[in-house]
Image (cartoon, grey):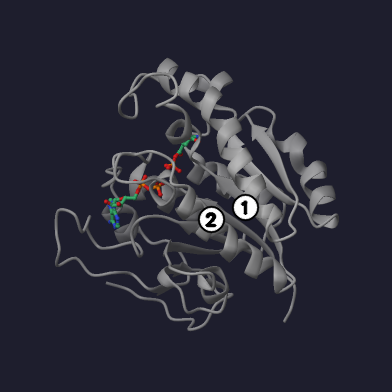
Amino acid sequence: MEKKRIVVKIGSSSLTDLNGKLSISKLRGHVEALARLKQQGHEVVLISSGAVAAGFKSIGYLSRPDKVVDKQSAAAVGQGLLLQAYADECKKHGIVAAQLLLTKDLYKNANATISNLLERDVLPIINENDSVSVKELTFGDNDMLSALVSRLVHADFLMILTDINGIYQDNPMKNPDAEKYTFLTEVHQEMENAATAEGASGVGTGGMKSKVEAAKTASASDIQVFIGSGEGSEKLVDIFEGKGDGTYIGSLVEPKVLVTL
Ligand SMILES: Nc1ncnc2c1ncn2[C@@H]1O[C@H](COP(=O)(O)OP(=O)(O)O)[C@@H](O)[C@H]1O
Ligand SMILES: N[C@@H](CCC(=O)OP(=O)(O)O)C(=O)O
C-alpha cells in the first residue's frame, strides 16, 4: 500500500462520557485505531481536542464551563492529563507521542518539527494552546486547526472524527428524516447551508458548520477529507479504504461520484 500522510482530528464529542468528562476508554480505542493506521506504513498526525473536558472537574466545576477564562484554566489543567493519557496508551503500541500546542500567529513554525517527528516515527499530537489564545487570535476551533495543519504538512488525507456519522442535509437532531451526503468531489453550497453550528453533545465547538468550513479549506488544497464516526481498531484503516461511516469529500477515495441534490 502506498504510504500517505494522514491527519486525524478527534473532537471533544468523541473523547467524552455523558457528563462531558474525558473518557479514557474512548481515548484508548482511538489510539488502537491510530496504531493500526501507522502499522500500515502511513505517516499520522493527530489533532486532539479534550483539554477542557479533561480538566474542568479537577478545578471544581461540575460541568464544562462556558466562560472563556474558565475554559482556558480547565485546559491548562487538562492538557497535561490528556497528553499523559495519550502517552500511556501509545506506549502500549510502542508509539512515542509528542505534544505541540499551536497558536494562530505561530503555527506555521511547527512545520519542520512535525516533519522531523514523522521521520522519526513519532506521533505528533496537536491542540490549540488554549490558555494563551485570546478571541482575536484563535483558530476558532480544532476543525480549522486541523485543516490548516493538513495544508501546512501537505497531508494527503484529513479524517475528522465526530459523534455523528457524516454531514446531513439538516441537523438530524432536529430533522430525523434528513439524508446524508456520502461521496462528493467538493463542498457545495447546499452542504454549507445544511451544516449548522449546533453541537448535539454540548461539549464540541463549532458543530458541523466548522467541519464543513475545514473541509472546504483542506479540499481546496487537494486534500481528501472524511467527516464521520467509526468503531473498533480498524475504523481509521476502513476510512482510508473508503469504507468509513461518514461523508467523503475529494477524489482520492472511490467511488468518485458527485452528489447533487
Ligand atoms: N447538517 C448537519 N449534519 C450533521 N450534524 C450536524 C449538522 N448540523 C449540525 N450538526 C451537529 O454537529 C454535531 C457535531 O459537532 P461538534 O459537537 O462540534 O463535534 P466535535 O466535538 O466532534 O467537534 C453533531 O452532533 C450534530 O448535532
Ligand atoms: N482546544 C479545546 C477544544 C476546542 C474544539 O474545537 O473542540 P471540538 O469542537 O470538540 O473539536 C480543548 O482541547 O478542549
**Mark 2: secondary structure:** helix
Disc 1: CA contacts within 10 A as few (<14), some (14-19) or many (>=20): many
Amino acid type indicated by mark 2: Arg
Q: Quadrant of the C terminus?
A: bottom left
Residue 45 vs 156, above or below: the answer is: above
Q: Residue at x 75, y 38 (%)?
A: 110
Q: Which residue is mark 1?
A: 89
**Mark 1: secondary structure:** helix
56 lies left or right of 222: left
110 lies left or right of 245: right
Disc 2: CA contacts within 10 A as few (<14), some (14-19) or many (>=20): some
Q: Tell me if the residue at label 1 has its CB under 8 Å from ligand 2.
A: no
Residue 135 makes an appearance in the image: no
The mark found on residue 153 in the picture is none
Closer-to-camera residue (216/198): 198
Residue 86 vs 229, above or below: the answer is: above
Q: Position of residue 177 (x, y in %)?
A: 14, 67
Q: Position of residue 153 (x, y in %)?
A: 72, 51
Q: CA distance from mark 2 to mark 1?
A: 6 Å
Q: Which residue is mark 2?
A: 28
Q: Position of residue 24 (x, y in %)?
A: 48, 48
